[in-house]
Image (cartoon, helix red, strand yellow):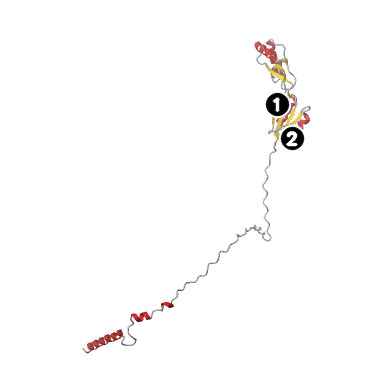
């Protein structure tokens, strides 16, 4: 019972002590109220708004364009001590170019000279071309059987024609394109030549024909590589006596 009393008394004293503290009876003034709180505030007239001062942005500065930089190729590394320097690359071989085409002409060529030119061209190799042309008026018409290629063939053909009752003929012996042809007549008038041709066909001579003849001039043109052609034309100029060397377009 004694302990219970002590506890109760202690609780009473504790409550009293708390009351005196709450009321402010022990130390300090009265409990601060609204007037004191207002008096303790800071003076509003003393307050100043302080803004952060920042440095002004600098004015833009014009920048001149950069000058172009010339890059110099680096020098090749020096060969190591005691070594050999690299050999320069060999230049690429230059392809050989063919000679441009050329042309040379000969005028007033005879039949024999024309055959010689053809033989020289045949032996000169590929790349050459031969062209012939004739100029001049027809002065006569020739009734004949074209060349048979050999004397023996011409004689056999002449014998066949004689058996058909035609005796006025002869075999051409002169060298040239008409060698071993059978001549049946030469007329200045084409009408007369055609009359003879009709009478021969009535007798059975079917191989006869009429060809115009005259003082025609034979022109021969040679075309080929200019370097080889120059050598060939120079040689022909010495051999073709009486022929005229002329120029022509390649």
Query: Residue 230: x percent and y percent?
Result: 74, 35
The x and y percentages for residue 165 are 69, 10
Seen as rendered, the residue at the extreme left is 1
Foreground pick, 15 / 162:
15
Q: Which quarter of the figure has residue 159?
A: top right
Q: Is residue 36 above or below residue 224?
A: below
Q: Look at mark 2 in the image and give the residue it sits on.
A: 230
Question: Which numbered mark, 1 or 2, is in the foreground of this view?
Answer: 1
Judged left or right of residue 203, residue 3 is left
Identify the residue at the far top of this view: 165
On residue 133, which mark appears?
Answer: 1
Q: Is residue 27 left or right of residue 160?
A: left
Q: Which corner quadrant holds the C terminus?
A: top right
Q: Residue at x 22, y 88 (%)?
A: 5
Residue 184, x across and y down, in percent: 71, 14
Task: Please name whichever residue, 180 or 42, is drawn nearer the observer in this view of the structure.
Answer: 42
> Can you say whether 153 is above or below 125 in the image?
above
């Amino acid at each position: 019972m004694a302990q219970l009393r002590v506890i109760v008394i202690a609780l009473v004293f504790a409550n009293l002590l708390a009351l005196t503290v709450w009321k402010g009876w022990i130390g300090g003034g009265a409990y601060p109220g609204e007037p004191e709180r207002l008096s303790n505030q800071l003076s509003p007239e003393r307050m100043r708004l302080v803004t952060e001062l920042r440095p002004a942005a600098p004015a833009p500065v014009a920048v001149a364009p950069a000058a172009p930089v010339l890059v110099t190729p680096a020098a090749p590394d020096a060969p190591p001590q005691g070594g050999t320097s690299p050999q320069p690359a060999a230049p690429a071989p230059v392809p050989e170019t063919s000679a441009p085409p050329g042309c040379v002409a000969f005028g007033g060529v005879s039949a024999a000279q024309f055959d010689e030119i053809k033989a020289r061209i045949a032996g000169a190799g590929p790349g050459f071309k031969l062209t012939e042309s004739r100029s001049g008026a027809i002065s006569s018409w020739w009734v004949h059987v074209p060349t048979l290629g050999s004397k023996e063939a011409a004689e056999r053909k002449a014998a066949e024609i004689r058996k058909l009752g035609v005796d006025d003929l002869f075999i051409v012996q002169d060298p040239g394109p008409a060698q071993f042809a059978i001549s049946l007549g030469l007329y200045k008038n084409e009408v007369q030549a055609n009359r003879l041709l009709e009478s021969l066909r009535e007798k059975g001579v079917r191989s006869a024909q009429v060809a115009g003849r005259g003082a025609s001039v034979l022109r021969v043109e040679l075309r080929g590589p200019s370097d080889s052609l120059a050598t060939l034309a120079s040689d022909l100029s010495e051999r073709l006596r009486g022929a005229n060397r002329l120029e022509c377009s390649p």
